[in-house]
Amino acid sequence: MFAKRLFHKALHHHHQGEGGASPAAPGDVPQMDAQIALHYGVPYTASLLAFDPVQRLLAVGTLDGRIKIFGGDNIEGILISPKSVPYKFLQVWNLEFRQLFYSSQWDVNITAFAAIEGSFLMYLGDENGLLSVLKYEVDDGKLQRMPYNVPIQSLTERAGISLQDPQPIVGILIQPDTFGTRLLIAYEKGLLVLWDVSDSNAISVRGYGDLHMKGQISGAQRDADEDQLNNAIDDSDEEREICSLCWASRGGSIVAVGYITGDILLWDMNTRPPRKDKQMDVSSNVVKLQLASGSRRLPVIVLHWSAGSAIHSNKGGHLFVYGGDDMGSEEVLTVLSLESTAGLESVRCMSRMDLKLDGSFADMILIPDTGVPDKSRTSALFILTNPGQLNFYADGSLFSVQNTKEGNALPEAQKFPVAIPITDPNITVTNLCSLTERELSNISLKKFCARQNAGPFILGNMKWPLTGGVPSEMSLNEDHAVERLYIAGYQDGSVRIWDATFPVLMPMFVLDGKVADINLDGANASVSSLAFCSLNMTLAVGTTSGLVCIYKLREHSGGSSFHFVSELKQEVHVVHHGKGFHCYVAFLASNCPVRSLLFTASGEVLATGYQNGQVAMFDLSQLSILFTVDCASGTNSPVVSLGIYSVTTSDAKADESEKETPQKARLLRDFLFSLTKDGRVTVLDCTPGVMMNSHILDQKQSSAISMYVIDGASDEKQTQLSEDTIGSQGQTGKEGNDVDNKQAPGVGKHLKNASHLSQNGGSDSLLVCCEDVLLLLSVASLIQGKNKYLNKLKLAKPCCWSAVLKNMDGKICGLILAYQTGTIELRSVPDLAIVADSSLMSILRWSYKAGMDKSMSSSNGQITLVNGSEFAIISLIASENDFRIPESLPCLHDKVLAAAAEAAISFSTEQRTKQNPAAGILGGIIKGMKGKAEESAKMRESFTVRTPHEHLESFFLKDSFVEPSIPNLDDPIEELSIDDVEIDDEVPAPAPASSSTSHRNNRTTEEREKLFEGSSHVGKPRMRTPQEILTKYKFGGDAAAAAAHAKDKLMQRQEKLERISQQTAELQNGAENFASLAQELAKTMENKKWWKL
């Protein structure tokens, strides 16, 4: 926070040193660097769900390369990939810094992916049927491809089957309790292989040839006869494609597979001894589930399994299914309660429950209640539907006995608690307000109102499963000053206010728009306009019924009385307000919807523009309506923008006492500029309510958007004018409602001396933004009734929204434009030149939609946007520091929680190793060891210390289907001794007793010569060179083959040296280029001041 204050102070002195009071030159416009400061809601293109059981974070993946992270305590984050192409990119994101650490493009489409829990290893399947292994290197932050891989051709050879064409891998499931050494590989055409990494062999194979046998599947659909089962399984191979799969048991012995035909098969993956009766073997390996009896059914897209409680975990569970119903039926998510008492053959479907969906189904996920999946019961179910809807069910509502019985009411889905309600209720208008340091001392906002009224509502005693993330320390400080407010109006008439000081919106108040004990007409109407005055903490809310409600955001403001003011009457009611802030006065000057609201500089007068073109002024201190004027000249064009122009007038008729105090003789007068949608600008004198003039700026009927008064005075904020310059007589507002001429009678004679205005306030201008043109006019010419264009610029694209950018002195220095194409431009003022541009697609991956401009708001370079169920704040200016302080952002990664989880996993692994040190991977290794007893004991001890994942990684360091490579001749080779050679020949059978002794001696001599290869001394065998050993054992005595191999090795070595030399030259050239660039940059930065860096 201290750094931010220092930056603002330096920027203030910078503007003063350059004459900051004058209009900004193009070089004074800050540099644009659009970034996402805040994002809430589920993306519109969401398609996938994932859950981190350790950090307790929910991730939502989209089709356009975005990843949305949900945690606890209103913590959310958005990660946007530079590439939006699916399937071919592998990326590693750092959640702590919210940065992309590594990105790699794959050669083929990635079709399956599975990470090994507790390690940095992961399996990968592609469209060619290749199983690969990747490892994330923590040191360099890259993904390393391990040598281990399983091509589909090699796998089918080991499994003893044959396939004509390669098939994509559509699913990879790691078998529980195997530390990643066993995995189930599912191929597109129905092949299932349980693969053992340690042995590089297939444990069991399913789905190949089994389904061609009629009548050998025991159906789980009890009401289906044998003919239906026979017809259902007599399908061609092309129709038996796998769409989804999941484990259907806690130990990973049964897998549920969903097919494109709508069938669900439960396969037993346990290995069994071969039986003579092959039909009985196939029937015991598979069970069929059929949700519908129609001939055409929906593919089974999603399958998920939830085990029962800890007591009945081995007897069954719940299978979540999307698909399998008849085509054209209602879209539901089916929950099957399965029970098994004696293996797969006894599986029974106990109940079925269909959950209705809110939209088109996208994905679902089951949330465990502890940090270890598959070892705990399910605590919640999240369902993702399009577009961007996320609902959830508590475990008690899903798995209760009452709900599983037929005829009982189904559980209702709960809406995902959102930080910013957008669609329920619908948001209509927003306002982002900044509070200056001078106004911070006037704030007495209490956050207990937010916790009482705006907290997320969760039914029952459910514990919210998403608790990840660490809130920022700055936002947790309850004594921090509120520097920014975000206000939103809704269709139900309510208004919500958030503390937007930090990039985490904290709810503060909910104003329901109703008045206690008073039936106020139009109180529940949709909110159409908002205005906030930070000077006296006053909030004005305009509705579609024409009602304007005023709130004082102070404690005990307004007392216990409520005032209703209209043109015909004024009522005072005594009400009893509860805690919080309430409406103390309501104005009704027209029954038309309110389109725009604007406070004067003092905050005591409010200007209101209506849908029918009328403009009204309300006095908040006297609680009265000052005047009402028709500014549309009978065209009923809505008022889209209002502007206040303040001048200081000197009264020449002041008496002697006033002359002694000159400051009392100077009166502040406000002029009101009204802009209608058809481009008509009307000038009003706010004091008497006189219409000065009214005329259309552009005759081409351009649709107007907004209007801004640019103050160009150099000495004082207000322009000084004499009383004679401005007419004080003419038709008042209430008497001039039918005025449709360009200038009111009796006003023109008072403007003939307007040359004095040009001398004192001629530098002030009015900027009007239209759909296809920008107009910059002189304020003095407008008051005189003339159109003096200082600048007129035609836009190449249709504009839909605009905002201004101010410097530290409050002077307008830039113009922000948003186009219907999604482009955002920053232009300089007053020359209106383009400084920089960006787009919603490049920043947020959003496309502009009709009506998006109605919910946009800005506060000096910070833009709020709403799209569907998404809410975002964009920080445009590079020097903006409020939302870019790293300490103000919540952290998505909890280091303490990660360290605790790692320690818990290590402790659990050690306990398992102590209970069974030779189990799993270690058993096969230790069992095959040979040598002395002491060496064997040391090796066993070393293997016990190593973790299972370290042993698993050792398997991945070699290719399972490649013969051992020939050692490099240049590498040092240890000499072989006779003790290192194992004889694999069979031991000769003992000779019969009748054999002669000489025959035995001759045979012994021949074997000894064969063993020692002609050595004269038995105790000292002849030493052989490495080349002789390779020639003898590797190439079968073929010297030519050995020589060719040595030549190939030398050629490979020469190629490596050439590549290294080429890379060295490239690095040297890159270093030289970098050095020259650094020198140029140093020269450029020498003349820059520190605040320009």
Image (cartoon, grey):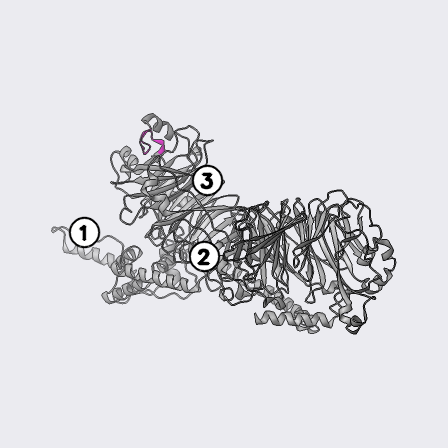
Tag of residue 989:
1
Residue annotated with mark 3: 357
Which callout, 3 or 1, points to the residue nearer the camera? Answer: 3
Quick check: 463 left or right of 878? left
Q: Which residues are magenta?
A: 211-223
The Cα atoms of the two marked residues, 1 and 2, are separated by 76 Å
Q: Is residue 455 left or right of residue 707?
A: left
Q: Is residue 430 visible?
A: yes
> Residue flagged by tag 1: what amino acid is it?
Ala
Along the line of sight, the residue nearer the viewer: 1087 or 578? 578
Q: Is residue 757 above or below residue 5?
A: above
In the structure shown, which secondary structural element does the residue marked by tag 3 occupy? loop
> Is 1017 placed left or right of 25 in the picture?
left
1 vs 2, front mark: 2
Please tell me how crowded label 3 is: few (under 14), some (14-19), or many (20+) other residues with Cα within 10 Å.
some
**What's the residue type where badge 2 is placed?**
Gly
